[in-house]
Amino acid sequence: MNEGVSLKRTMVQAAHCAFPYTIPIFAGFWFLGLTYGVYMNVAGFSVLYPMLMSLTIFGGSLEFIAVNMMLSAYAPVQTLMVAFVVQARHLFYGISMLDQFKGMGFKKLYLIFGMCDETFSINYSAEIPEHIDRGWFMFFVTLLNHFYWVSGATIGGLLGSLIPFHAEGLEFVMTAMFVVIFLEQWFKEKKHYTAVIGLGASALCLVIFGADSFMIPSMICILCLLTAFRKPIERTGGLQ
C-alpha cells in the first residue's frame, strides 16, 4: 500500500514538474495539429485517419507528406525511403539519449517511440530538480507532447468540414517555437561552444546542399564535430 502511494506521489510530482516545460510545445503542436487534421479532411479522409496517424506515426513532417503518398499509386519501397530520409535525424537523437535512457525500465519503450524533436530538446537539456524522478519526468514530457499532437489533429479533423480554414503560412509556428527553445538553452549555458558548432555547421551545409537537403548532412557534421571536440569542450565547461 505504501509503495503504491509513494509511486503515485512520485508520478504526480514528475507530471507537475514536466507540464510547464511543455507549454510552448502545446501552442505549436495544437496549431499545426489542427492544420494537419483540416488538411486531411480537405484531402478526403475521415477524422479517423488524422487521429490514428498522429497516434501511431507521431512525426509531423512525415504525416503531412504521407497524405500525398496515400493519394498516389502504391509504392512501398519509395514510401519506406522517404520516411527514412525525413525521420533520419532521430538516429542522432537516439544516440544522444543512450545514457539517459539507462535504467528506465518499461518506460524506455515509450520514450523511444515518442521522442520527437521537441521532446528530445526538453528531455536532453531540462534541469530536473533532485527530488523529481528523472524517468517519470521524461515520460510525462513525452506523453503530454504526444497528447497535444493527437488531440490537435483529431479536433482539426472534426472541424475541417465545418470551418473554412487556410493553412498556408502556419508552418512558421514550428520555426518560432524552435527559436524560443534555442534561445532558452542559449541563456542557460555558461559557454556557447555547442550552439556555435550547431549554427556554423548548419549554415555551411545549407550553403553547400541547399534548403531541401541540408538537414542530414548538418546532423552528421554536428555529431562528428561534437565527438571530436567533446573532451576540450567538457574541460572548459562548454557542456554545462
Image: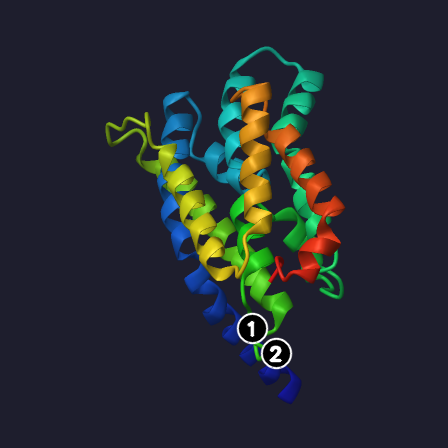
Q: Position of residue 27 (x, y in %)?
A: 36, 48
Amino acid at circle 2: Leu
Q: How many marks?
A: 2
Q: Position of residue 148 (x, y in %)?
A: 44, 49
Q: Measure the alpha-carbon separation of dots 1 and 2.
A: 6 Å
Q: Quadrant of the N terminus?
A: bottom right
132 or 210: nearer the viewer = 210
Identify whether 231 is placed above or below 150.
below
Secondary structure of the residue carrying tag 2 is helix
> Which residue is pictured at 42% across the width and 34% down the height?
47
Q: Quadrant of the C terminus?
A: bottom right
Q: Position of residue 182 (x, y in %)?
A: 47, 48
Q: Can residue 15 be seen here?
A: yes
**Mark 1 and mark 2 residues within 8 Å of each other at the beta carbon:** yes
Secondary structure of the residue carrying tag 1 is helix
138 or 51: nearer the viewer = 138
206 or 7: nearer the viewer = 206
Q: Residues within 10 Å of mark 1 (few under 14, many from 20)?
A: some
Q: Residues within 10 Å of mark 2 (few under 14, many from 20)?
A: few
Q: Can residue 58 be seen here?
A: no
* Residue under numbered circle 1: 11
> Which residue is pictured at 56% across the width and 73% down the height?
11
* Residue under numbered circle 2: 7
Identify whether 63 is placed above or below 69.
below
Q: Quadrant of residue 223?
A: top right
Q: Is residue 64 left or right of residue 90?
A: left
234 or 108: nearer the viewer = 234
Q: Position of residue 176 (x, y in %)?
A: 38, 41
Identify whether 210 is placed above or below 184.
above
Amino acid at circle 1: Met
What label sits on residue 34 in the rendered view? none
